[in-house]
Image (cartoon, rainbow, N blue to C red):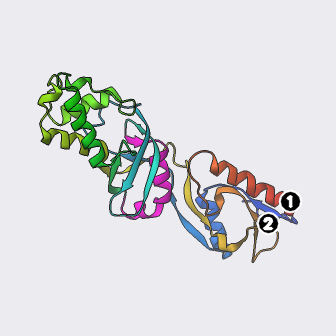
Amino acid sequence: GDSGTIYSADALVIATGAAPSVWHKLEELGLKVESAVPSLFTFNIKDIRLEGLSGMAFPEVHVRITGTKLEEQGPLLITHWGLSGPAILKLSAWGARGLEEQKYQFSIQINLLPEHSFDQFRQLLINYKGEHPTQKVKNFHREDIPNRYWERLLKYLDIDPDMLFGKLPQKQINKLTVELTQATFEVKGKSTFKEEFVTCGGVSLSEVNLKTMEAKRFPGLYFSGEVLNIDALTGGFNFQSCWTTAWLISEAI
């Protein structure tokens, strides 16, 4: 403490989470500490296709970060800032360091209908056109495409919603198919729910005996939870790592 009081203990457990001040002290002690970067965050996207649709969800999509091998599948949520939901949050975790290096400026490609390729869905629309030539384009419905999003795409592509399907040009069918199976969005930044939401970074796992969570070079010093260089996917896994490491420490002590 500030008073200079020295305490003696058989064991010291550090469970301070992603606290930079503690990391600095541990670095001064000689421990290897990985720098912190946000791990679970939403993608900031300003795009006419998303405006005013906050809260709209898609049950299952496939998202890929362009120019990388990072891709994920899962639910997608439109927010005030852009895109979120498990598919996005998982991508943000896998790409935490790489995306930070790009200063959160990158592009993503989304297939809103992952069970269909471009060619498959294009053919589906062509078949639909042949079977329902007198139906208005705005009345095309699928459970996995919210009606408001379909209407937004028609406006975005300058397609008259009252046009009959039989008169829908092939060029417009191609454009609609691109938007539903290969849509590209530009990401310009990130949003976290609060600064400490989840970070990767912390005491390097190479410093720790993973069976006991004790520092290899400092007997009696233990680490639990996010003070370690651990970050997990969304869904409570970070809580689980905190509980698990704490239990291992209690057993060891």
- Cα distance, mark 2 to mark 1? 8 Å
Question: Would residue 157 be found to the left or right of residue 249 on screen?
Answer: left
Q: Quarter-wise, where is residue 124 in the image?
A: top left
- Whole-percent x and y of residue 3? 76, 60
Question: Would residue 188 be found to the left or right of residue 35 on screen?
Answer: left
Q: Quarter-wise, where is residue 250 in the image?
A: bottom right
- Whole-percent x and y of residue 141? 32, 27
Asked if the stretch drawn in magenta spans residue 241, the answer is no
- Classify mark 2: residues with Cα within 10 Å, few (<14), some (14-19) or many (20+): some
Q: Residue at x 37, y 63 (%)?
A: 68
CB-based contact (under 8 Å), mark 2 and mark 1: yes
Q: Is 236 placed above or below 217 here?
A: above
Q: Is residue 109 or residue 218 the one in the foreground? A: 109
Q: Which mark is residue 251?
A: 1
Q: Residue at x 59, y 45 (%)?
A: 235
User: Tag 2: residue type?
Assistant: Thr
Per the image, the residue denoted by label 2 is 212
